[in-house]
Image (cartoon, coloured by chain):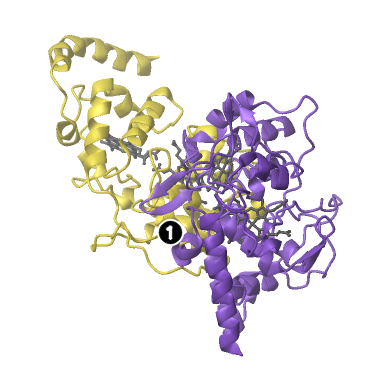
Chain colours: A yellow, B purple
Amino acid sequence: MRKLITPLLSGLLLLPALLPLSAQAVDGSDIMQKGGANPAAMPCITCHGTDGKGMAAAGFPRLAGLPEAYIAKQLADFKAGRRENAVMQPIAQSLTPEEVAAVAKAYAELPKVNIKPGPVERPQPGSGAWIALRGAWERNIPECTLCHGPAGVGVGDTFPPLAGQSTLYIENQLKAWRGTKAVAATRKTKAVAAVPPSRRNDPNGLMAHIAVDLSEAEIKAVADYFAGLGESKETFDESQHRLR
Amino acid sequence: MKNAKILAALLGGICLFAGVANAADTANTSRNSRLDDQTQLPKAPAKPVSQQYFQPPADTDIPNNAFGELVRRGQDLFMNTKALAPEYVGNEMNCVNCHIDRGRKANSAPLWAAYPMYPAYRKKNNKVNTYVERMQGCFQFSMNGKPPAADSEILTALTTYAYWLSTGAPTGKALPGRGFDEPPPPKGGYDIARGKAVYEKQCQLCHGENGEGKKVGVTSVFPALWGKDSYNWGAGMHRINTAAGFIQHNMPLGRGETLSDQEAWDVAAYINSHERPQDPRLVNGSIDETRKRYHADDGVNLYGVVVNGKKLGQGLQ
């Protein structure tokens, strides 16, 4: 109960202060640096990095160069609870719709992850690269690159890049779509209740069944693969094909 | 001898090319008429529940020698046809777009079920089609392109890949999983308007509002379902029954087997009620004559049929 009241109260107290602000145009890069008008909307750079490339070791994702519509959708999903996360939900809830639009636009304008196309890759069966580039069709798992784009660079507004994200972040998301199964009690251990998935925001269930049907080892391996792509300094010539 | 062969192949190629170019005003007689035969595959036997589909060999079984190199080259071409053989591909398609999982997936016209069934005799026109001719047909129609010569490096590599995938498969025996295992036509027929609703809900996200697909840079990621970048009016996929089978087993991507027979037929009809590149076999520049010769008994299709006040089959420039 108290948990609910505090943000409500602070919201009310802030309201008068907000009114003059929202009349002005909100500046996206200001929000990144200094946070939103509501102090609960902390400066994004503290976690997502000054360059927007995230913090790999902490599992804070890269936002730089993600599609504007995708960022706005995620913030809406955090707000609505379709995507649960103790850190990010309160922040998303404290952003006004104008702030969401401005910060989404500003992050989308930062450089996209730059992956140079290589020659055809020949992944080894059983490796993370194999799941990424070949999938596991016997379980109806298409290769990740078929939706997330060649080399995981993302496709359109709907399919975010996986290249540029860290092992920990990718793993966390796949686990969030899985939840965990209940474990029955044994003589020595207590029963563990099932945890329902905390991310339930994929359009038409395109992503959830994939996360559920991968093994833990495969999740780690495929996350390592995309994290390991790194970023190329040489800019990519867009007239070249990216091969499958 | 060798030169004569190359010359013949070259000439054949030129004739074919000319045939495509002039098709609008003359019925071309010099083309390889066996390629015109796009009749659908016979129904494959059903798979007993207890039995698995045929399992093609694993990639680790590709030998490390000249043969293995050719197998890999064939697989590369199959997946990256537009990038690696652009002179033979007139749209933005790759073979793998319709033959899922590199031609391995059952009910997606897998290559292991195809290769051992050729040369195939067709009673309908009393002709024999070789495996290479079947692939040339896919280049001409599905890829809206120009078939590579029968003895070209490209078709040799693609044949070698299919041969390798068929390792251990019986010759001349139809295997379950061949073709697209079409659902039966729904009792009340199909409905294009209902198909549009299915499309907008389940397909548009990837294939685009106008069926144009999606690209990353110049590379097609989600293939086009109609319009200039898609298969032409002569391709097998233009048949509603064939597309319904492909869609029901393989789409939405990764969520095959979720659409009902009715939904699969409706959405297949919606896709195939849009304009796409002309049938290269166009007879005397006439849609009606072409329908009569090639489309009238070719499954269920809308070529030459009036839909929403417009006759389909106009083609695109």
Q: Foreground: B214 or A127?
A: B214
Q: Position of residue B64 (x, y in %)?
A: 58, 83
Q: Residue at x 30, y 35 (%)?
A: A68
Quadrant for the N terminus of chain A in the image: top left
In this image, B122 relative to A104: left or right?
A: right
Q: Position of residue A181 (x, y in %)?
A: 61, 40
Judging from the image, mark 1 belongs to the subunit labelled A
In this image, A86 relative to B300: left or right?
A: left
Quarter residue B291 falls in: top right
Q: Residue at x 22, y 44 (%)?
A: A110
Category of crowding for the residue at label 1, using alpha-carbon neighbours closer than 10 angstroms: few (below 14), some (14–19), many (at least 20): some
Q: Residue at x 76, y 47 (%)?
A: B181
Q: Position of residue B76 (x, y in %)?
A: 52, 68
In this image, B121 relative to A120: left or right?
A: right
Q: Foreground: A174 or A148?
A: A148
Q: Position of residue A33 (x, y in %)?
A: 15, 36
Secondary structure at badge 1 equals helix
Q: How many marks?
A: 1
Q: Tell which residue pokes out farthest to the bottom in this image.
A: B1
Residue B311 is at least partly visible in this image: yes
Question: Mark 1 belongs to which amino acid?
Answer: Asp
- Above or below for B214 versus A76: below
Quarter residue B27 falls in: bottom right
Residue A124 is at least partly visible in this image: no
Look at mark 1 in the image and give the residue it sits on. Answer: A224
Q: Foreground: B24 or B272?
A: B24
Q: Residue at x 81, y 53 (%)?
A: B42
- Above or below for A6 versus B99: above
In this image, B210 relative to A97: left or right?
A: right
